[in-house]
Image (cartoon, rainbow, N blue to C red):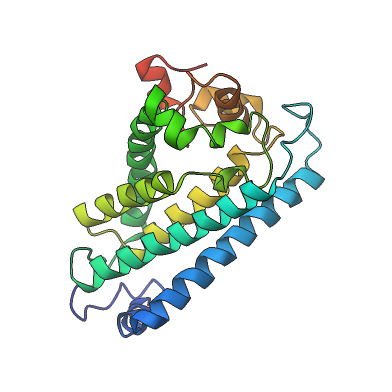
């Protein structure tokens, strides 16, 4: 944190909450990170099921990928890995490797959120592309692509190194600039919702969104069908730029 500065009075004051988290013991941090990530896991599954039951658009695949016991166990391991990343983030914050802007403006929050989305999309493009190199794919990423069609666990069916690698990219960005807690929270919320929607087996976005470089459900579904295309996550910008767009 940046000393005891208070936030702009027009904003909700998060400084008290940050002070509370600063005083957490490591046992409290472990419990908080586990409970938070279990909640996000359940929220993602619930959102997926809700959209599946209410969305009237045609299926992208004939049927959803079957839910297996091994996928369930791997998804729980992903939750644990995400909790470890959160603990590492808390450690970096408490040791001043990560600092939080306590006086953000509306404009700065908006710009920071856009920056996080675009920068993470670029980093994830290269990370995802590297995951498809033959040796890496066989060891790390192949399990995720067993889901040619998808289900409510597909987002979490990842090798632990993939999950931790994604988390480390976020932490590197947070160490490089003093983002506000609001920007970080908005980005992480978008990330979870986007990942859930991206792994639906029904198109969620209007077809016109393709023209706005949005990484739609169909965009990511095409990647599961053709693994050499569409490596982006939030947008199709980098795939269009580097010639991997379909």
Quarter of the image where the N terminus is located: bottom left
List x then y, in percent, for residue 132. Answer: 42, 26
Residue located 53% across and 72% down the image? 35
In the rendered structure, the answer to whether residue 85 lies left or right of residue 56 reads: left
| Count of numbered marks | 0
**Any part of residue 67 in sight:** yes
Q: Nearer the viewer, residue 20 or 103?
A: 20
- Observer-nearest residue: 142 or 121? 142
Residue 62 percent across, percent down from the top left: 79, 26
Rendered residue at 61%/25% (across/down) = 208
Closer to the camera, 204 or 76? 76
Q: Position of residue 36 (x, y in %)?
A: 51, 69
Above or below for 140 versus 77 = above
Instruction: State whether residue 99 is above or below residue 23.
Output: above
Q: Can you say whether 225 is above or below 126 in the image?
A: above
Q: Answer with left or right where residue 44 lies relative to residue 161.
A: right
Which x, y percent locates residue 66? 74, 39
Q: Using residue 167 as the reference point, say whether residue 44 is left or right of it.
A: right
Give the quadrant of residue 6. Answer: bottom left
Name the residue located 45 percent from the left edge and 29 percent from the top edge.
Answer: 138
Q: Quadrant of residue 56?
A: top right
Whether residue 177 is visible? no
- Is 202 located above or below residue 3 in the figure? above
């Amino acid at each position: 944190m940046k000393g005891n500065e208070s936030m702009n009075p027009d904003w909700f004051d998060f400084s008290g909450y940050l002070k509370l988290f600063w005083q957490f013991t490591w046992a409290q941090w472990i419990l908080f990170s586990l409970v938070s990530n279990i909640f996000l896991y359940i929220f993602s599954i619930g959102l997926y099921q809700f959209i599946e039951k209410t969305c009237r658009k045609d299926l992208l695949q004939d049927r959803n990928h079957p839910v297996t016991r091994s996928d369930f166990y791997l998804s729980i391991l992903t939750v644990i890995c995400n909790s470890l990343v959160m603990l590492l983030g808390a450690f970096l914050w408490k040791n001043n490797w990560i600092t939080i802007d306590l006086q953000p403006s509306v404009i700065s929050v908006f710009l920071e959120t856009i920056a996080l989305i675009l920068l993470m999309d670029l980093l994830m493009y290269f990370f995802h592309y590297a995951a498809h190199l033959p040796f890496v794919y066989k060891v790390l990423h192949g399990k995720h692509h067993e889901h040619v069609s998808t289900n409510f666990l597909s987002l979490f069916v990842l090798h632990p190194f993939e999950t931790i690698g994604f988390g480390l990219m976020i932490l590197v960005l947070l160490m490089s600039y003093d983002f506000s807690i609001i920007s970080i929270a908005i980005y992480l919320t978008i990330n979870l919702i986007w990942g859930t929607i991206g792994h639906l087996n029904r198109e969620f976005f209007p077809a016109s969104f393709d023209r706005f470089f949005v990484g739609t459900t169909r965009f990511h579904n095409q990647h599961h069908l053709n693994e050499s295309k569409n490596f982006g996550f939030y947008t199709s910008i980098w795939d269009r730029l580097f010639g991997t767009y379909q």
